[in-house]
Amino acid sequence: MEVVTRETGAAIPDRVVRHRLGREDVIRVGLAVAFGLVLYLFILLPMAKMIWRSLLDGDGQWVGLANYARYFGTPAIAASITNSLYVAVVSMVLTVGLAFGYAYALTRTRLPARGLFRVVAMLPIFAPSLVQAFAFVYVFGNNGIFTRVTGVNVGIYGAKGIILAEVFYCFPHALLILIAALAATDARLYDAARTLGASSPKTFLTVTLPGAKFGLVSACFVVFTTVITDFGAPKVIGGKFSVMATEIYNQVSGQQNFTMGATVSVVLLIPAILAFVVDRIVQRRQYALVTASARPLVPAPRPSRDWAATVYCLLVALVIAGIYAVILVASLVHRWPYNLGLTLKHYAFDTVGGYTPLWNSVQVALWTAGVGTVLTFGGAYVVEKCRPPARGVLYLLSILPVSIPGMVLGLAYIFTFNAPGSPLNLLYGTLAILVVSNVIHYFTVGFLTATTALKQMDAEFENVSASLGVPFYRTFWRVTVPIALPSIVAISMYFFLNAMVTLSAVVFLVAPGTELAAVAVLLMDDAGDTAQAAAMSVLIIGTGLGVRLLYWLAMKRVTRRTQAWTQPGERPAAGGPT
Amino acid sequence: MASPAAASPPVARPNTARPAAVALEGIAKKFGVFIALRGVSLSVDPGEFVCFLGPSGCGKTTLLRIIAGLERQNAGAVLMAGRDVSTWPAAQRNYGIVFQSYALFPNLTVARNVGYGLETRKAGKREIARRVDELLDLVGLRHHREKYPAQLSGGEQQRIALARALAPSPALLLLDEPLSALDARVRQSLRHEIRGLQRRLGITTIMVTHDQEEALAMADRIVVMNHGVVEQVGPPVEVYMRPRSPFVARFVGQMNFLDAVAGPRPRSAHMGAMELTLPADGDPETTAAGPGTPLILAIRPEEIVVGPGAQGAPNRLATRIRSIQFLGSFTRLVLFLPGDGERVLECDVAATAFVALGVAEGGELSMALPPESLRVFRKES
């Protein structure tokens, strides 16, 4: 008979019996170290350098918080803080309100032509933020068509214009979150409310709104952060109304005052990080509203509500479509709004060197998609499945970039990669640094998407492989990647589209020879070539739409080919895996 | 099912020259302040089927994962076939494992799942195909060769997972609650199938389960665990008939518990005013405890004798029937013990015998607690 000894817990040592390191462990640790190094080099180090720079004067002497004192003490500059907050909060309320109505109509009413309404609402995703601003200038600006026809100048330059442009720029981002929140519901809740005799408004307040609560918070967070860190729209339509992002640009590009640029950047980090922390706390309290037994809600026809929804969506969709129609027309006519004869002459781009910026943009976007996907998915795999010692730190660093405004990241990269004598200097002035800054700028969403996909996989896959003597990297290729393919393609799409339209993360980093399309739009607008700026915008949007179409076609094939296993066979899967 | 196991006497285990397939020496594990295992020692013979049985949180799964090298112990050693493998990574320990979720690769066909562990072993394509077919025949699923896991039923997936684990001919098979995701009927038939397969292959197997019925039906030996400690190790019949602690008695099968104190006469106990005779062959330490020692007496519902059979038997009590539950092949009677009228005993009577009794709820019934069926435990203060 076996001897069974009883020991008290105190006698159990804290150390664990270590397994000897095999080749696979070395590879795992190596990957974790490499990932950590990338995060250190391109996130932690640049941010530290920038914060450090804000504590020095123009000659590199330590001055403590003197720069901050000067910032807050100069009313003209300090106003940018309140201006930024004002614009961000008003845009947030308007965008989320508008988008909620639109999302509600899409998910909870019998709206006709839903697919079309959805596609139109998504258009702003394909355009740099300044395009929205252009459109409002073309219509309501001093030489706008509305101003000329009616003789009424609504004074679009300033907070009013920024807010209008931002609302339409952020609209699809908020809409996507709210559609997801409203689509995830359980019809049984509404049945219960009806049987209990609750009126429609009461059901809306007690069932619909609480159900969408977390989506609303998330949408607010996204819009607030996007607006407060956006640079394109305020630059084009802001006039003399200075916000923090344009202030950084003016300090750095206009006055070559890098120290003040760093100071404003650090201050701009605060609201973005605060919003990020609040969102994290709220999301942590999220609970599963939709269980496996939930029944999807199919809205019953109700003519009055359905008509109202249709009219509302039609209005919003018309404004969005109008924005892009104005841009398209302006790029195709001789001289908006004086000579509306058609021409292609604005597509010559003689002032910015022809099509080089567009080609550069496509190249950078392709590389960003490739590198970004490999790095986010690989990084998420290392953190989630290899379980390295410092995985908490790696995770935190991976979700940090979402709260770093693009301008701030770009400026931090100047401090890091434009330092004479540093080997990192090699990157400066190349397309590579643009790729890196884009990858890091959009890192978090890619990383979280990959993490979610990996978390949905059976945690024992790696253990089964180990027991079968199959190395983890083989299972990664044969099982993990194929299963996650839809997510991987979605991540690369996300990187590509954002790299095409971003301005803020690259505006400080472009150099002669590495001009990008979005920056060219800004420069041409600055130089007064608004028609060419519109033409370049049209090409950026066209490229994005084209790639999106290719993606859609590719996804159809990918799904058919590699995801065959998700199609149920002739036998129902009882207790199916994963 | 358990009869071959009962045939081997519990104490005189064949002490062969072959080392134990798996030996655990003082395994301890804690997660922060929670102690999962408190120094567990155990040995598993080659070809043996051992079940780790216990409630959730008792440490049985942790122990299995330590054997597999998926969890690292704080103290103690794991030996396989006589070699200390404590520091070996999972990949080198030569075992196959089936998880509760099966963890079948959803994007690979059944054949590729089963052949997964063979592909890296420099085996030829033809040889792999032959081995895969052999295993699919073994679990009777060759016709599903080219299907994907999602196209199979839960029980079929389970068998594919088993075939995959067995494909590289491991020395040890580990099963982590392999049947708990299945419905009752499938579970029943898979019990037999797994047990039959294990016998045919003669592969040493350790299965973790919280289902005592499953453990009784399948295991050569059961390791009953609670709070990170092994409470009892033994063949199913022994664990069922002679539980070594009240915990084992309660966890395995149905059991009535009665508070009593040791009486002045040897092998006697008092329960209120009643005097009971204790078994002659019980644990001398408890049955011969000094007068006044608090005891717990345990008896299984089917061991209580009722009606005419109780006439003249020792430990006879007059009771009243509180309730009657008809449960198919037998009927469960809940009986008031004499005295305060609050304590009850459950008693199972075969359906035919119940009809012969001719009793109804509220009626009087005499019953007897046969001394040889009483388990006696010291009451822990």
Image: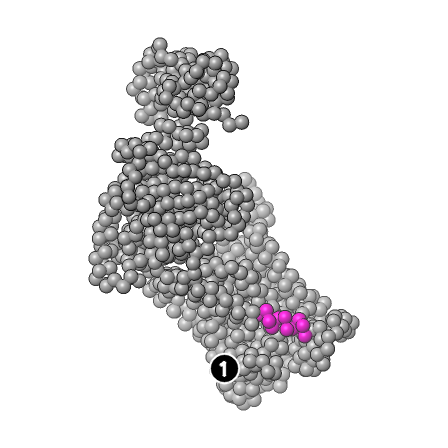
Which of the image's four quarters has the N terminus of chain B? Answer: top left
Q: Position of residue A33 (x, y in %)?
A: 50, 67
Looking at the picture, how far across and down is residue A575, in whole percent? 36, 47
Indicate the position of residue A495 as horizontal and vertical percent values.
49, 70
| Quarter of the figure with residue A469 | bottom left
Identify the subunit bearing mark 1.
A
**Is A394 located above or below residue B32 in the figure?**
below
Instruction: In this rendered view, identify the residue nearer to me: B82 or A398.
Output: B82
Question: What span is colored magenta in the figure?
Answer: A42-53
Q: Is A44 a magenta residue?
A: yes
Q: Which residue is mark 1?
A: A360
Q: Vertically, is A374 above or below A453?
A: below
Please, what is the three-letter code of the amino acid marked with disc 1?
Answer: Asn
Q: A214 or A122: nearer the eye?
A: A214
Q: Nearer the viewer, residue A293 or B15?
A: B15
Q: Residue at x 33, y 56 (%)?
A: A468
**Looking at the image, residue B304 lies above or below residue A65:** above
